[in-house]
Amino acid sequence: MASITLNHVAKHFGSKVAIADIDLKVEDGEFLVLLGPSGCGKSTLLRMLAGLETVTSGEIDVGGRRVDQLPPSARDMAFVFQSYALYPHMTVRRNIAFPLIMRQFKWWFHIPLIGGLAKRRVERSPEVSELVERTAKTLSLTELLDRYPRTLSGGQRQRVALGRAMVRKPEVFLMDEPLSNLDAKLRSAMRAEITRLHGRVGGTFVYVTHDQVEAMTMGTRIALLRDGVIQQFGTPREIYTSPANTYVARFIGTPPMNLIEARVEGEAIRIGEALLPLPVRLLPAARTAGGGAVLLGIRPGALRIASPSEADGLSGLVSFVEHVGAESVVAVGLARARTAHEEEDQVAGEVMITAPGYSELAPGAAVTIGLDLSEAVLFSAETGQRLSGEPATAN
Ligand code: ATP
């Protein structure tokens, strides 16, 4: 097991900056998820860790040892790819045993007949066969050991790829979107599988994905990247409840966090005509709001369709409703009171509400929305950074 430290790590491809200047410390035994949209640099970062890509500048340490100048083979890391990269002409057993066979590699393993016999001998040696059997059992592959990859499902192939990584007993497991080729049901089963694997084998895991659900369910911490820059590094809970900026707020959560244009007025917040008292928790943040214009960040579950007489409600018109089984997602265009020269109320932005059960609301219905501000957050309308109530730069 090993901690990983990145010190000012950058990667440029010609004039393209793939990774800007990253500092990161991953603790021993952590499950770090590198999350972000396509092209944000997460695979490049993982490949630099593995040694498949050079660093343009900066330093990578693993377990206190500098590794950025070492070849991949000297780094004691196992890489699991999105495409399983199994050998099609080898059985599952041989695929899993392969790294162990290669450890005992001799030049004459290349000679067809003699090499084949020698490899089989290593594969059948007690220490190798026991480890392969044990690993196969852990991953529920025992029945499949004598099959070939082409006869396996995507999930089974991915488990073989994991098995091949596990037998090496590496200090660090690196995984690049290993579940992206699987269907939704299998993905969720494999998510649980990999999380259990992490619990069982220990080791430090670094896992790349663009899927926020994978990040939230598997990671002990998440580094959310955008254009080669880390937007936030924290636990799934921190990232969900206290997003560092509006980008993070909108990236995590389905539907994403609503960002409502608002204005701080003393200890209250004005949204259109409504003036809502702020919870005490938000007062320090509200005080730092400068000119008063803010974005109120509120999750869809903290909004509800209220009775028209609700004192602090917002009014709006339903624009669409989606029924997703246990709950409904209702999109509402918020009304802004008309000004002197406007004939009708104007829409001041749309919010998403998750309502339990099957909503009977139809597009065009006039509704009143109640807000629960207990977990809301405030962002600067100017910079998009979360207002924490602390000075922007701490000394
Ligand atoms: P995806 O999820 O689509 O794989 P990613 O977040 O993993 O995306 P990277 O593959 O790390 O993104 O790429 C980051 C940026 O660097 C992209 O803009 C990409 O086009 C660029 N890039 C990656 N590899 C190279 C290369 N060999 N030469 C030039 N540019 C590259």
Image: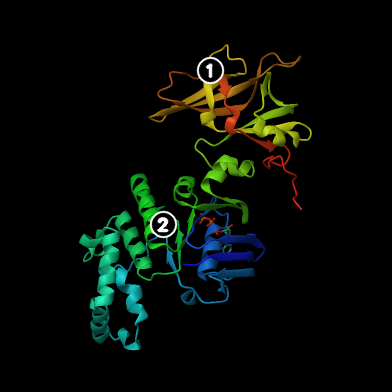
Amino acid at pointer 2: Pro
Residue with the mark numbered 2: 178
State the residue in front, 203 or 162. Answer: 203
> Helix, strand, or loop for circle 2?
loop
Residue 144 rendering spot, x and y as whole percentages:
22, 61
State the residue at coordinates (24%, 79%).
Answer: 125
Residue placed farthest to the front in the image?
280
Compared with residue 34, is residue 324 higher up or lower down, i.e. above or below? above
Residue 348's image quarter?
Answer: top right
Amino acid at the residue labelled 1: Ala
Pointer 2: residues within 10 angstroms few (<14), some, or many (20+)? many
Q: Quadrant of residue 315?
A: top right
Residue farthest toward the right in the current orientation of the protein: 291
Q: Ligand 1: give its quadrant.
A: bottom right
Residue nearest the viewer, comparing 112 with 242: 242
Asked if 359 appears above or below 99 in the picture, the reply is above
Residue positioned 40% across, 53% down in the render: 195
| Picture layout, residue 106 above or below residue 75 | below
Q: Return the residue found at the far bottom.
A: 108
Give yes or no for contact between labels 2 and 1 (Cβ–Cβ under 8 Å). Answer: no
Residue neighbourhood size for the residue with mark 1, other residues' Cα within 10 Å, grouped as few (<14), some (14–19), many (≥20):
some
Q: Using the image, tell me which numbered label, if any, was put on residue 84.
A: none
What residue would you read off at disc 1? Answer: 306
Residue 376 is situated, as x and y percent measured from the top left of the image, at 60, 33
Measured as percent of width and height from the top left, residue 250 is found at 58, 40
Q: Is residue 89 visible?
A: no
- Tell me which residue sits at (75%, 37%) in the image: 288
Query: Toward which corner of the image does residue 230 lie, by quadrant?
Result: bottom right
